[in-house]
Image (spheres, rainbow, N blue to C red):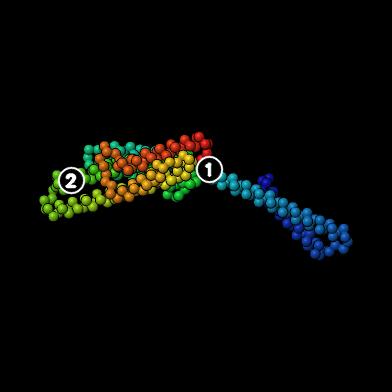
Amino acid sequence: MNTDILLTLLSVVWGLLLTLIGIVMANYPPNVPWKKWLYHGLFSLLFVAVVITTLIQSSRTQREQSAERARHEREQSTERAQHASEQGRLEGKLSFISDVMSKSSCPGIAEIGAVVKQEVATQIYERLRKPISEGNLDGLSSDILVAMVPKVTGHLRTSFREWSAIDSPLLFSKYLETEHRASEKDPAVLEQKKKEWDHKIELEREDYRSNLKQALSDADLLRKALLDRLPKDAQTAADNEEAAAFARALTDVPSMMPLPMQFGSPPAISKAADYLDALAKRVALAKSLRGTN
């Protein structure tokens, strides 16, 4: 017989017996001392039996609920891991295809490939920066913070190459449509088309500047979290200077323009990324020497 069923039956039996004893005591009050003690003893014994049975049932229910929650959490964790793995494979394939498209000699295909590539990179980075956006860096170990650094600095360094990969085809398309192969001969119409292209290009540049500012802000928050994990005696005056350098880089973002791919990132961005990489190595070294988080 199932244990839960047995416990339920016992609870019912104890309850019926208690009720029966109560009815008997009410209808046939004991008139001798030993009967009083007998009724009281049986009543107390049954009451204790009800309490014990109820406690056992409650304990079993709690254990079963805990086990069910743990099983559910394991299943959810497995599903999340499978989903992340599958999403990673799909994003990898999409990144490869978009990378090939972005290198196409056809401006239209290159522009589409660059846009798709940027979208995939943005989605990947958004997942990475979740602890940063939620303000949970203080609760992370130094190992996790150090592991995040290459992805953040990599995103900073590649952002300008991706920006140039989108900006250049747009400029080329504007040139083809309004100058080189312009089918429209009316100067006023051509001028309007140029303005429309300029507006489209500026919107794209503002979007990249916004993303770059967000990436720099993330890098600065990560810098502060890493410095908190670095022992005071290991910190230098250069660390304070880098804080000012990060602030200057953030203020420079609105004036930044996409650079040709061969020039890489602006010095302020490269310097910020290089410092963050070096800081992560210092934190990892300090942890290995002290054996603490």
Q: Is residue 180 left or right of residue 270?
A: left
52 and 232: which is toward the camera: 232
Tell me, yes or no, whether the two marked residues, 2 and 1, touch with CB atoms within 8 Å: no
133 and 248: which is toward the camera: 248
Q: Residues within 10 Å of mark 1 (few under 14, many from 20)?
A: few
Judged from this view, the residue extending furthest toward the front is: 237
Question: What kind of residue is marked 2?
Answer: Tyr
Residue 193, given in percent of the width and then of the height, sits at 18, 52
53 and 116: which is toward the camera: 116
Quadrant position of residue 267:
top left
Question: What kind of residue is marked 1?
Answer: Arg
Residue at image coords 25%, 38%: 104
Numbered tag placed on residue 74 in the rendering:
1
Residue at image coords 13%, 48%: 183
Residue 275 seen by the camera:
yes
Residue at image coords 34%, 48%: 248
Secondary structure under the numbered disc 1 in the rendered image: helix
* Residue at the disc numbered 2: 175
Q: Is residue 56 left or right of residue 145?
A: right
Residue 90 seen by the camera:
no
Numbered tag placed on residue 14 in the rendering:
none
Q: Residues within 10 Å of mark 2 (few under 14, many from 20)?
A: some
Residue 52, given in percent of the width and then of the height, sits at 72, 51
In whole angstroms, how far apart are the C-alphas of marks 2 and 1?
57 Å
69 and 256: which is toward the camera: 256
Q: Is residue 112 left or right of residue 224?
A: left
Residue at image coords 17%, 54%: 192
